[in-house]
Image (cartoon, rainbow, N blue to C red):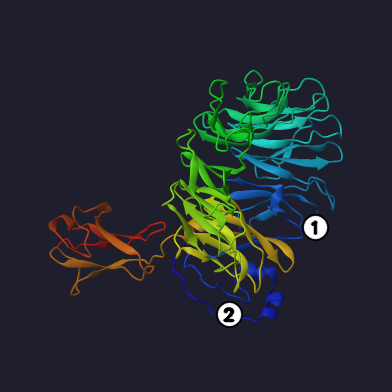
Amino acid sequence: MRTSPLKSTTTTGAVVALGLSALALGVGATAPASAHGNTTAVLAKSFSSMDPENGVAALGNRVVFAATAETGGNEPWISDGTPAGTTMLKDIVPGAADSIPRNFTTVGSRVYFTAETAATGEELWITDGTTAGTKLVANIGPNALGSDPTSLTAVGNRLVFAADDNVTGSELWSSGGTAATTHLIGNLRPGADSSSPREITLTSNGTAFFRAFGTSGTELYRTDGTQGGTILVKDIQAGGGNASPQEITHLSGGSVVFSADDGLTGREVWRSDGTAAGTVLVKDVTPGVSSTDLSKFTKVGAKVFYSSTSPGQEAELFATNGTAGGTGLVKDLAPGGAQSSFVDSIVDVGGTAYFTAQVPGQGRELWTSNGTAAGTRLVRDIDPGAPSGILGPLVANGRFVAFGATTKAAGREPWVSNGLSTGTALVRDILPGSTETQAVTSFGTKVLYHGAVQGKDTIFSVDVQRYFTVDSAKPRTKVVKGGKARVGKRLKVVTGTWEKGAKLTVRWLRAGKPIAGATKRSYKLTRKDRGKRVSVRVTGTLPGHNPVTVTSPPRKVKKS
């Protein structure tokens, strides 16, 4: 990541004259405070309205979302993160009226979502990323009543969700993308009453867990996507009480951890393998009937990280591996017990937890943890002092993390981090003042950001993988002391200018294949090279970056 200050070439007033199209090309009043040599933020499009809370789903190297543009109402759109690749998928309700698409959920190579028309009400739709492939799946609620699908979740190659057919109430359904493959799989509260399935969570063995209000109260259920495989796991709070499982999170294999109240120990952390016998209290952190305040459950590597209170201590960072001994405080970030660090936005970045926290003397900033106190640290105090540098959310892309961050100089703009203080950087100061930018979702090598430009909801993309790829040059070979490349002559590599701090390693090639032991900056040609093409491969590495390998043009060795 090479950074270099760029000069401003226009005035603030000229920004308006340039317009959004100029910004999309990387031109504007304010050049980046620091610009990586490989990439910067690209403005894809501005809308009359676009709210990420309505859902955004990745479809390969594109994203699907809802927006309202200059013409048409609120409809589904698709973008590859560039202006040319951002288009309306389908005007479901033609003209200025809205179909109000939301709940975008990726299942394989398609995205499901809900949309509303006068003829059907709110129902389930699907898209393959084309206009022709964007269509109603099924009119589950008869006529225009709508089934109000919710809790859309991928379970294998099918969608599992809650819907109300206006006969059985809101119950568990499954769909393969057509009306014929869409059916009820769990009427957990017979009759017109609803069981209202929520927090449908897939495990790695294909089983999904969820919470529902069945005949035993609000308890833990599981499904394999079939009617026969949709069952109550355990009546945790027996006798008609409500254990109300929350924060259901995949742990490993077919197991989940969650919070529940059994009526005896209060709300605590539980674990389940999908059987009644294997559904157990992990640890009673707050002894007796008092509850522990639990939230933000997130799977990171082999553990689940979360925010938890404990006796005499406000909420701090905890982690569990599903056992009592492996469950506890990771680190008290706001020591003394009377103050919480307000842990939020926990994400898994290459098996390491990244999160935001607020500690005494600092605002909300970026932190990371490997699950130990010693391995839990502040990444960077982006806005020093009491102001908060980050409000979240955090979005992972491979081993990097993206977010919106605030500084006094630039306002709230797009940032990225590779976990190093020096690798936590402003991507681009989009405009003078704050664009209120936040990271939304990851797709392919990119992250989608949402912000405000000239009063309009605007989406940006940053190729995060490319941003953190070592800046390279094209190497070439040179004959030492001049002349032709002949046996006995020595070639040396001219690497060119690579990113500052990058470590370069060399490998000489004969006819495209590595030459044994030839790993120095120069190479003496031998008889084996006669008549062959010799080149050199240079690899640049830098902590916190993706390595780059570049090969020089081949040089043919004379036969005589």
- What is the secondary structure assignment of the residue under circle 2? loop
Pick the front one: 342 or 425? 342
User: Which residue was labeled with disc 2?
Assistant: 8
Kindly identify the amino acid type of the residue bearing the numbered disc 1: Thr
Residue identified by numbered label 1: 71
Residue 403 placement (x, y as % from top left): 58, 58
Q: Position of residue 255 (x, y in %)?
A: 53, 30
Residue 484 disc label: none
Of the numbered discs 2 and 1, the one sitting upstream in the chain is: 2
Position of 142 with respect to 524 (left or right) is right
Vertical arrangement, residue 481 with respect to residue 440, above or below: below
| 484 on left or right of 422 | left
Picture quarter with the C terminus: bottom left
Using the rendered view, name the quadrant where residue 471 is placed.
bottom left
Q: Position of residue 122 (x, y in %)?
A: 80, 38
User: Are there few (<14), some (14-19), or many (20+) residues within 10 Å of tag 1?
Assistant: few
Question: Disc 2 residue type?
Answer: Ser
433 left or right, relative to 558: right
Specify whether residue 553 is in view: no
- C-alpha distance separating marks 2 and 1: 34 Å
Q: Residue at x 53, y 23 (%)?
A: 278
Q: Quadrant of the N terminus?
A: bottom left
Please tell me in which quadrant of the rendered image residue 172 appears.
Answer: top right
SS of the residue at dot 1? loop
